Image (tube, coloured by chain):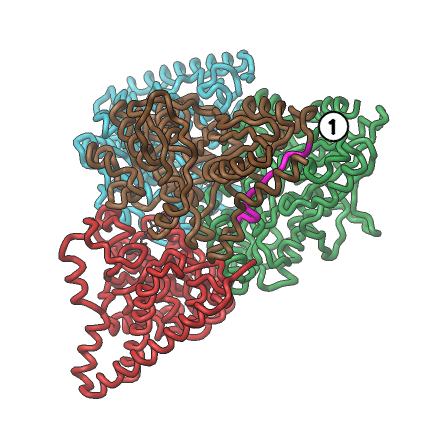
Chain colours: A brown, B green, C cyan, D red
Amino acid sequence: MPWTKLVADQRRNFEPVGGGGCDRVLTYGEAISEAMEQAMEIDPRVIILGEGVSQPGFIYNTTRSICKRYGTKRVIETPIAEAALTGVTLGASLAGLRPVLIHMRCDFLLVSMDQIINHIAHWKRVFGNDTPLVIRAVIARGWGSGAQHSQSFHSLFASFEGLEVLMPATPYDIKGLFLSAVASPKPVLFLEHRWLYGDRDYVPRGTYLVPLGKAVLREEGSDITLIGMSLTNRDIYMAREKLKSERIFADWIDLRSINPIDLDTIYSSVAKTGRLLIVENGPVCCGIGAEIASRVMENCWDFLKTPVQRIGWPSATVPAGPELERQFYPGVDQILTTIRKMVT
Amino acid sequence: MPWTKLVADQRRNFEPVGGGGCDRVLTYGEAISEAMEQAMEIDPRVIILGEGVSQPGFIYNTTRSICKRYGTKRVIETPIAEAALTGVTLGASLAGLRPVLIHMRCDFLLVSMDQIINHIAHWKRVFGNDTPLVIRAVIARGWGSGAQHSQSFHSLFASFEGLEVLMPATPYDIKGLFLSAVASPKPVLFLEHRWLYGDRDYVPRGTYLVPLGKAVLREEGSDITLIGMSLTNRDIYMAREKLKSERIFADWIDLRSINPIDLDTIYSSVAKTGRLLIVENGPVCCGIGAEIASRVMENCWDFLKTPVQRIGWPSATVPAGPELERQFYPGVDQILTTIRKMVT
Amino acid sequence: MDITTAFYLYSTMLKIRLVEEAIVNEYPLQEIQTPVHLYIGQEAIAAGIAINLQPHDFIVSNHRSHGHCLARGMDLEGFFKELYGKQGGVTSGWGGSMHIGDIERGIIGTSAIVAGGIPIGAGVALAQKMLSEGITVIYFGDGAVDEGIFWETLNFCKLNDLPVLFVMEDNHYASQTPTEQRHAYADIAHIVQGYEIPTLTLDGNNVFEVAKVSGNLINRIREGAGPCFMRCRTYRWKGHVGCSEDDDMGYRPAAELSIWKTRCPILWLEKYLTEQYPGKAEIEFFSRRDYWQREIDSAISKAKEAPYAVD
Amino acid sequence: MDITTAFYLYSTMLKIRLVEEAIVNEYPLQEIQTPVHLYIGQEAIAAGIAINLQPHDFIVSNHRSHGHCLARGMDLEGFFKELYGKQGGVTSGWGGSMHIGDIERGIIGTSAIVAGGIPIGAGVALAQKMLSEGITVIYFGDGAVDEGIFWETLNFCKLNDLPVLFVMEDNHYASQTPTEQRHAYADIAHIVQGYEIPTLTLDGNNVFEVAKVSGNLINRIREGAGPCFMRCRTYRWKGHVGCSEDDDMGYRPAAELSIWKTRCPILWLEKYLTEQYPGKAEIEFFSRRDYWQREIDSAISKAKEAPYAVD
Ligand SMILES: Cc1ncc(C[n+]2csc(CCOP(=O)(O)OP(=O)(O)O)c2C)c(N)n1
Ligand SMILES: Cc1ncc(C[n+]2csc(CCOP(=O)(O)OP(=O)(O)O)c2C)c(N)n1
Ligand SMILES: [Mg+2]
Ligand SMILES: [Mg+2]
């Protein structure tokens, strides 16, 4: 796909965050592929379902290795029927499997909203039974993907405490979070970003878990707290680097988990910096940033030096044309301008 | 249905807000029924679709008169197929009708989420054509309606600027807003509350429009701003009356429109009172209250004496048992306690 | 049908009927505060199918689930406690009548979203197939097939040869809307057969027929035939929701209910058993009724006494 | 087929083919920045149906819509400007290839959600029925019938006798997944017939057959027969998305594409016309090709020159 190349050219890596003696580099795409393979190895109850999972595209190459190794018994090619598949996933989890359902686009989640919310999100609370399942969905952007292929619906799922919603941003995290997601008794929505697939990072060979529900403080600073999620971490990284020369230093939190929100990490950073900017990977209005901003106001009132600010998409409808796209997505400049206003 | 009786017993009316020489009282249910009849009379393009619209239950008696008057050609009984019906509604609006689709429960909207968001919400922005359609859905509560029959999804739709989302709270408003909704070129989600059906108010006989996108300042006061929506206005009304004896006076805003939010009305009230409490008819987390709180912080920072507070449901999963229900829904007492804390 | 089975079927149907009648009696007291969708008139279906199930089999049901769950062996006390919103209810007071379940007893749960449980049942069957044990019965009404998710699931089950018995309880109405107003096709069985799914239409009020047909289909499913489909023609006596008969509302033709009452599945079986086993039958009827009535009365009073479920 | 119609059909197919080939040529320049789902190989369907449409008729289409829209008369310049994201694009640069439309020319729009456009088409037809004018053609692939919303819509259309022509373009794959892996039933036509909907399976690469069958069905629809269904067997030459042929990827059997290329709908018609109208045919081919190539070149250069759509 053309935008793969496009992205590859534009890509700027985060600094590797792995470490711990690890010296092997993988891409985000390779990391999730490896995570799936290891999950299936560890646990014979893990199965994979989805449209195209066993076809040569292999969901951006992330199911190739599991297809080869585990074949069509555990990697199930499906019809295009997201609503039913989501119910199937729930049922399978109730009867002893650990299913992973994959969607090529986040946008397709809406077709199965009734199963995700009316059924999956409430099941444990109502019936008492665990529903260990994972739904992977990929957020896309650019190359005219437009209104129905570029949306990011993380915030729609954030109010349902029966769901976990993750947005891994690095190869290290995507592997560790996926393994945690599969291991969890709770249902997990696992939202990947297409533009991160080429990013590289140190990734341990073995299995490891990144805890669910926890943000990570990626870098420390004392002037302002910046919260990123998924792809917006990349802009934050770049903005933060630039600000150093202006002697502005930021705490950079990668949210990682949209539901639940790791408020402790956020509160303690804001208590230190007194300023908070959230960069949403989605429309500003009613985004997860609104909930964070409200909580921070309620709980860090005495520390706040200036109102919490949010940056995100100007509208929920994403345009297709190249120039419209360029105008649409906020970038490093908007982040820099906002931060400069906030700290002075 | 038993809860009808239950509600009738517990009902406490708002003060009538109509006036203007009008001396006729209708219930909320009668008012929407009359609005539909008048809309169909005014405009032959208006048609009604839904499950049970022509059956003796008549959607809580709101379609009885139109069935009698306009018959099955314009009041179309449908199969239980919310997703397709929503697409049908969109298509009909594009080809010259003004369709009104009715759901007996707000919860069923999820089945048609793809049509509402991926199609209806984006259509005008992408294709440029008007989509004059209305989707009525009724929020229920109590009598063990539980996890799948008591939800209130207004906030899920609040970030899509291609939609209008209304939550009328009075007979006067439900009639005037419905007529405006049908008259509007934009698609409107019209969220009613089952517990308001028996409420009475002065309602003019003729047709009139209540403007879309506008909140209403129901009562004035200077100590705090209270924002209600749909049923929570009832609790606010009662709390406000009680507070008078404590010499606490509140601006009471009935939000009416969830999308767009009437920020001007809110800002000017908060500029006066310096305090804001939002009482959500739904889960607190990621509710419309979060967006309002964030905006108010961004725009009324210098006026705010205390952090904006939110009251709402403790969880997105609604329990069924009577005592669990009683515990679940916040009421007048919680509002009073919060206000007292905020003003001292 | 051998005598033990015949009386067992009778007993199950009677239990369901008596439970539903007890709810009808209790409901006006407004202590049961949950919308009830009663099964009276349809008992033969749940009873006839349940006898063919084994411990590792599962059922998934819908809003009208009392009969399915009781036939499958849901605990009466847990059932009533749930209806009363009490501690010890099968879903801890969180579910109410529309969400009962007990996975330990083969009841995955029930969805009050029309057709919402259908794909969940398919998922259960997928797990059973992979773990090589058991089959799943999915109960749903004539209304559920209006929803696209039913057709998606049918296709998925056949593609994967899942061990599912689809049981459509065709009681002629979805809420108050007659089937003909909702189905463009004359015969769903014909359409389902297009999937090469073994499909049978039967008298859902004849418990022997239900038991036999479902027994055969379930055996085929156990042997790996993939999904099978039963369309059971039946009728609900009460209104869609609540305890009144609502035949005065006007959506059902005047004589319809009374005609269907003459086809009462329990009366029919009583008549049959009386003819086959004169003397013995009457004694059995009395003792079963007496037994279940006591059980129900005891469950209800325990439910009434129990503390409310709280958080 | 009379000579004028035959050459008109040829011209329409050629236009579509040349447009798609122009896109293939241009795409590597990365100025067209939108995912394209090319119609090469399927041209006979759009062309054959379009000649039976009248001004007040509508079409609704899916992600693979170029052919449908061009056959229905979408403006070439507006089309290319949309692909280039320029001002004057049919959807003002907001849609891109996946969302083109022009209601003034009978094109309601296109949805890139599989099956998402199907109920919208039904709604258009509902309006047409009430306003007594026109019919709607709904185009969709073999993948769209996997979705429940297709079945819901089919039922709704038949219940309300809506003036809809369902056109299923069965090109044997949805993305890379073959139909047999997604459909449990052998023949969808058989199933649709269960709704008593007139249904025909035909060679979608034979434009005369498409034109005749669709013409007959559309006449019946205009006379009030309610919805009709066509299953057109065809094949796409290019990959699911983008401009490469992707037959090396391994999801299509080795010789499949080359076999289908021998069944090229345009070549077939050229052969027929050459036989029928020797001499004249070659001249027509040349002049049509010349005409469309100029039109396309001009539209592309105008699109390239136009300013980008901005907000
Ligand atoms: C998605 C959805 N739409 C509508 C409803 C409202 N509703 C509840 S039961 C019912 C009728 C179901 O009819 P059927 O499947 O025949 O079951 P029956 O009640 O006849 O047993 C409807 C429309 C619902 N619960 N869910
Ligand atoms: C709801 C949804 N699920 C999945 C997709 C991804 N997708 C886009 S086109 C396509 C295949 C469609 O196949 P078909 O309907 O046969 O049309 P064709 O591409 O063959 O013309 C898929 C799965 C989507 N766009 N929408
Ligand atoms: Mg029914
Ligand atoms: Mg196809």
Q: For label 1, count other residues whose C-alpha is less than 10 Å away and answer few (under 14), some (14-19) or many (20+).
A: some
In this picture, is A314 found above or below B13?
A: below
Compare residues C291 and D260 and report the one nearer the observer.
D260
State whether residue A257 appears in this view: yes
Q: Where is residue A50 in the image (x, y as percent from the top left)?
A: 31, 40
Name the image quarter holding residue D219. Answer: bottom left
On screen, residue C45 versus residue C160, left or right, reads: right
Name the image quarter holding residue A291. Answer: top right
Residue at 30 percent of width and 76 percent of height: D9
The furthest residue to the front: A245
Asked if the magenta segment contains residue A314, the reply would be yes
**Residue position marked by numbered label 1 in the rendering:** B306
Q: Within the displayed image, which quadrant is ligand 1 positioned in?
A: top left
In this picture, is A134 found above or below B204?
A: above
Magenta residue span: A306-316
Compare residues A67 and B22 and report the one nearer the observer.
A67
- Marked residue chain, label 1: B
Q: Helix or strand or loop: what does disc 1 sit on?
A: loop
Q: Which amino acid does label 1 sit on?
A: Thr
Q: Quadrant of the C terminus of chain B?
A: top right
Compare residues D66 and D89 and report the one nearer the observer.
D89
The furthest residue to the bottom: D279
Asked if the magenta segment contains residue C15, the reply would be no
